[in-house]
């Protein structure tokens, strides 16, 4: 009976040690995962910010090029109309060109904004799925490790009896 009590106490101590060790390991893994997830999230944010900046720069450059070409066309049209003394047509043409410039600017801003939002959503979704997958793996690993420790403790108790 003393041997059983001693064995039982030894098994309980071993179980407590293993449980504490396992809890510490889980906490360490959780901390590593959180740190990794935070780093991944920062990386994804930086990538999406860089993509947004690139898209804005491309849209801005396209607008500048279109605007410069439009200004040259307006100048040429104005010179032709000035030579033919048709100032009313010149004003109409200028207003028409300005409307065209505004329309182009609006379309480019709208399309670049939508593309950026879509990319951010895709990256955020991919990141969330990746983090969930890592969490699922960690939980599965923890459950199987706990089951293994319990089986070992049970086997030690059985062999001690």
Image (tube, rainbow, N blue to C red):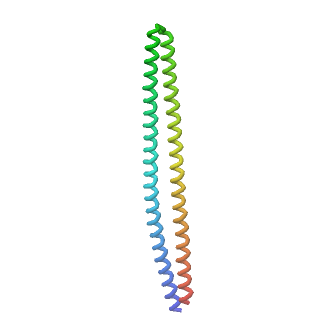
State the residue at coordinates (47%, 12%): 81
Q: Quadrant of the C terminus?
A: bottom right
State the residue at coordinates (48%, 13%): 90
Q: Quadrant of the N terminus?
A: bottom right
Percent across and percent down for residue 122 are 53, 48
Residue closest to the eye, 32 or 45: 45
Residue closest to the eye, 61 or 28: 61
Percent across and percent down for residue 137 are 53, 65
Q: How many marks?
A: 0
State the residue at coordinates (53%, 39%): 114
Residue closest to the eye, 8 or 149: 149
Judged from this view, the residue extending furthest toward the top is 85
> Is 61 placed above or below 93 here?
below
Percent across and percent down for residue 20 are 46, 73
Residue closest to the eye, 159 or 85: 85
> Is 139 placed above or below 83 here?
below
> Is 139 placed above or below 12 here?
above
State the residue at coordinates (43%, 55%): 39
Percent across and percent down for residue 53 are 43, 40
């Amino acid at each position: 009976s003393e041997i059983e009590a001693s064995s039982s106490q030894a098994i309980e101590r071993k179980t407590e040690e293993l449980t504490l060790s396992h809890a510490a390991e889980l906490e360490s893994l959780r901390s590593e995962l959180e740190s990794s997830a935070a780093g991944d999230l920062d990386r994804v944010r930086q990538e999406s910010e860089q993509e947004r900046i690139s898209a804005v720069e491309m849209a801005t450059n396209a607008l500048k090029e279109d605007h410069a070409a439009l200004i040259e066309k307006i100048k040429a049209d104005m010179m032709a109309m000035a030579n033919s003394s048709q100032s009313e047509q010149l004003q109409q043409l200028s207003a028409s060109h300005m409307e065209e410039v505004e329309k182009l600017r609006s379309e480019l801003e709208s399309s670049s904004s939508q593309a950026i939002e879509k990319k951010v959503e895709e990256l955020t979704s991919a990141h969330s799925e990746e983090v969930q997958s890592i969490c699922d793996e960690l939980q599965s690993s923890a459950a199987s490790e706990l089951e293994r420790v319990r089986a070992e403790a049970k086997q030690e108790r059985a062999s001690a009896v």
